[in-house]
Amino acid sequence: QSVVTQPPSASGTPGQRVTISCSGSSSNIGSNTVNWYQQLPGTAPKLLIYTNNQRPSGVPDRFSGSKSGTSASLAISGLQSEDEADYYCAAWDDSLNDVLFGGGTKLTVL
Amino acid sequence: EVQLVESGGGLVQPGGSLRLSCAASGFTFSSNWMSWVRQAPGKGLEWVANIKEDGSTRNYVESVKGRFTISRDNAKNSLYLQMNSLRVEDTAVYYCARRAHGSSWSNFDYWGQGTLVTVSS
């Protein structure tokens, strides 16, 4: 069973830089692009990063993404209180023929 | 402005059926793959199913195969999810999501607000 893994929690103080990791396998992250979603409390997910490192219009450049091999990362610099949310990575899995989401990372701004 | 508005959620007993709808507007609905993604209470996101622009191809997560059917009516700009033989573990908020045109399978650029399905006796 292919699984995409994220740390359940992350935290930082305002102004800090935090990173969230996303670990997969050759059948998902290793062979497909990664997308990241931000879900603010009580709201629907929102596309944050697409195709590994691209930002949709309107997403601040404080958010950046990268991918190497079977892992990907989301970095948030200049952390702000409004960044407190759940973050999910996602990738297609060639073995399962499914979209796989990571388990999600709850970001707390201290 | 792209809008996706889900409806049809509610309380249903185990073994029952429910049909979800998603009304799309603000874009050419027939030009995009569409998906359903669900989120159980307090849990993460789970992709459920997707359907090609013309409805000719459909894919499902293993746990719903044979029970759920995704469909679309491009003339009505609407996406549907027929859910049969519902189980307690199908309880979740169900989101309608648009796959970005020409992009990867997991690139959902617009989401609806979600509709809650509760399966309980």
Image (tube, grey):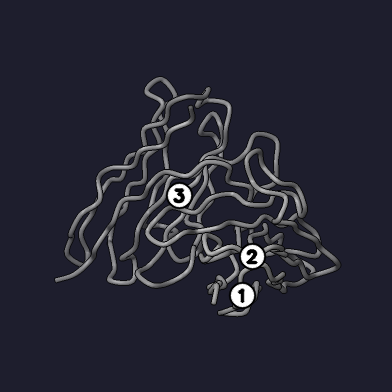
Residue that carries the numbered disc 2 in the rendered image: A79
Q: Quadrant of residue B89?
A: bottom left
Image x and y of residue A44, in percent:
44, 52
Q: Look at discs 1 and 3 and give the one toward the viewer.
A: 1
Image x and y of residue B9, in percent:
25, 51
Q: Amino acid at mark 3?
A: Trp
* Pointer 1 local density, CA inside 10 Å: few below 14, some 14–19, many at least 20: some
Query: Dot 3 lies on which element?
Result: strand
Look at 52% across and 46% down and name the residue there. Answer: B50
Task: Name the chain under label 3.
Answer: B
Foreground of the two, B5 or B87: B5
In the picture, the disc for residue B36 is 3
Foreground of the two, A46 or B23: A46
Q: How many marks?
A: 3
Query: Dot 2 lies on which element?
Result: loop
Q: Quadrant of residue A34?
A: bottom right
Q: Is residue A11 left or right of residue B7?
A: right
In the picture, the disc for residue A13 is 1
